Amino acid sequence: MRSRAFALGLTGALALSALVCLGATNVVLAFGPMEWAPAQALNPNAATDDPSSGNDYNPKLATDGSGHWVCVWHSKETLGGTVGTDYDIFVARSEDNGNTWTGPVAIDPLATTDATSDYHPKVETDGNGHWIVFWYTTDPRGGSGTDADLLFSVSDDNGATWSTPAFLNSNATTDGDSDGDYAKALTTDGHGNWMAVWDTSRPGGEGSILEVSYAVSTNGTTWSDAGFVNSTAPNAGDDRGANIATDGNGMWVAIWYSDNLLGTNGVGDETDIHFSRSTDLGETWSPAAALNTTAQTDAYRDVFPHLCADGAGHWTAVWSIKYGKWVSDPGDYDIYVATSTNGMTWTAPALLNTNGAQTGYDWKPIVDTDRNGNWVAVWESRELMSNPPLGSDRDIVYALSTDHGASWSPTAVLNDFAPMPMDFYHDYEPDLVYGGNGFWMTAWYSVYNLNGTIGGDRDILFSTACLPLLNGDHDCDGDVDLVDFASFQACFTTTGPIESGCGLFDLDSDDNVDLGDFIELVSALTGP
């Protein structure tokens, strides 16, 4: 029988009292399973926004690791008629690790008057109070023409206010109306240096040719002239889907997918993952090379790459592979992974999603790390999983690695409502960010109405998880204290299965939360 509270007994009480008063040396032990909290609406107006114009898309997250979070997305939301009906960039922020969020506001003051759209924002912070959002717009402001150009805005107060948007791409007013620049990724080394990468479209051949462009900033407010990352530019093939990461120690690596041949790499009928490395803040780049070591022999489509570094020499790249040249070919997408210890040589691609043999697609993965050996990947999936049983709609799934990406846990469902017997509650394009002290957050956009509590339009949902760096730190606040002890009491049982949300307290991995786990918890208490 389950017990919600229990008597410690004299010995246990004295031990707890002594540890709380004197402080105990915390033992970092193996963690329990990763448990994601039930999904919630991130935008507080999800229940009241206009169902015909309030669709929200493509959220991106950033945090300073001190409880402050910023989420940005694009939407036709009018905020009660105060914003125009075109797509604009919206922001919401949290100062308490996502417990509460501000209502969304439009970043751009012109959102109230312009009639052209803004799309796909990216957000990043240096952790020192400086936040940047950049996106692409079709607004011809400043004589920039009707092509897509890049805007950025800066906040120095954790997202409460934002600077007037300015062009990030230096050629915004001189390139042609047939050109286009499309925001893809932004990162910083935390030492004042920033780098943005994007896809650049230029006329050529029978249509447009895509190249990977970049710019750097040493202050977050002014940007260098745009340049090309891919050494093959300009060329007759397409380079797109750019992503960028840095180890914070002077190395920057850009990756993208390309149908350009590199020497003998490629058979000419697929895309591969290419990369280039800079050790001088983009002054020079290594020649473009294939990251997937199968590039010379495969005939697959390698697409949607994402890259992360832990600052201690470990790099992990994830992407989707389509078994067939074209999207219409038989076969599905699966997630693959490769790792590096220098950002230059990479392991052979390995299947990341353990259910890869099933029919269905898995794509647009995101990977992040807690810089303590744990790596988490999330992605959008239409796999017909059997445990739990899932329909054919799109869901958000994840996997965990505790060895720097060398091996991964079985694919598991992240959005808690996924097993519902519905096939039309689609969930799209998750973002994942590590928030410090073992705290993780994922955000995505969804048509699910949270059991009727919000509207049926697309809204931003989010979920959090604790993967504690300290054994027993159930709330991921960086210590093991009486708050964690109270949570342990609520999870304690003498027999029976572990209840939802209690897996982190199975500290001795015997599939229940009992006196053995209590002993482990007491040995780990730090107080207060």
Image (tube, helix red, strand yellow):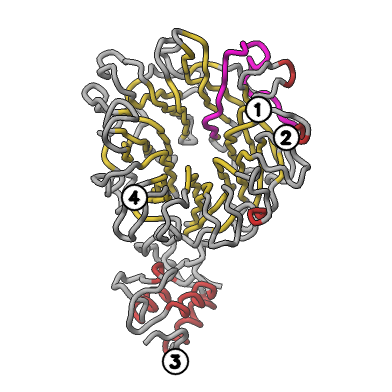
Q: Residue at x 28, y 13 (%)?
A: 263
Q: Give SS at disc 2.
A: loop
Mark 2 and mark 3: span between their CA atoms? 62 Å
| Dot label at residue 401 | 4
State yes or no: discs 2 and 1 in contact (Cβ < 8 Å). yes
Q: Callout 4, which amino acid?
A: Ser
Determine the secondary structure under disc 3.
Answer: helix
Q: Position of residue 13 (x, y in %)?
A: 47, 87
Question: Which residue lies under the disc numbered 2?
Answer: 108
Indicate the amino acid at tag 2.
Asp
Q: Nearer the viewer, mark 2 or mark 3?
A: 2
Against 522, residue 264 (above or below) is above
Q: Earlier along the polypeptide chain: callout 1 or callout 4?
A: 1
The residue pinned by badge 1 equals: 151
Question: What residue do we see at 28% from left, 16% from top?
Answer: 268
The location of residue 479, given as percent across then percent down, is 51, 65
With 468 as the anchor, is 334 left or right in this view? left
The amino acid marked with disc number 3 is Leu
Mark 3 vs mark 1, CA separation in Å: 64 Å
Mark closer to the chain start, 3 or 4: 3
Q: Which residue is found at the position 49% from the left and 69% from the top?
A: 480
Q: Earlier in the sequence, mark 3 or mark 1?
A: 3
Asked if residue 288 lies in the magenta stretch, the reply is no
Closer to the eye: label 3 or 1: 1
Labels 3 and 4 touching (C-beta < 8 A): no
Residue 121 vertical placement versus 459 (above, below) = above
Q: Is residue 95 visible?
A: no
Magenta span covers which residues? 164-187
In this view, 219 is above or below 237: below
Q: Which residue is mark 3?
A: 10
Sooner in the amino-acid sequence: mark 2 or mark 1: 2
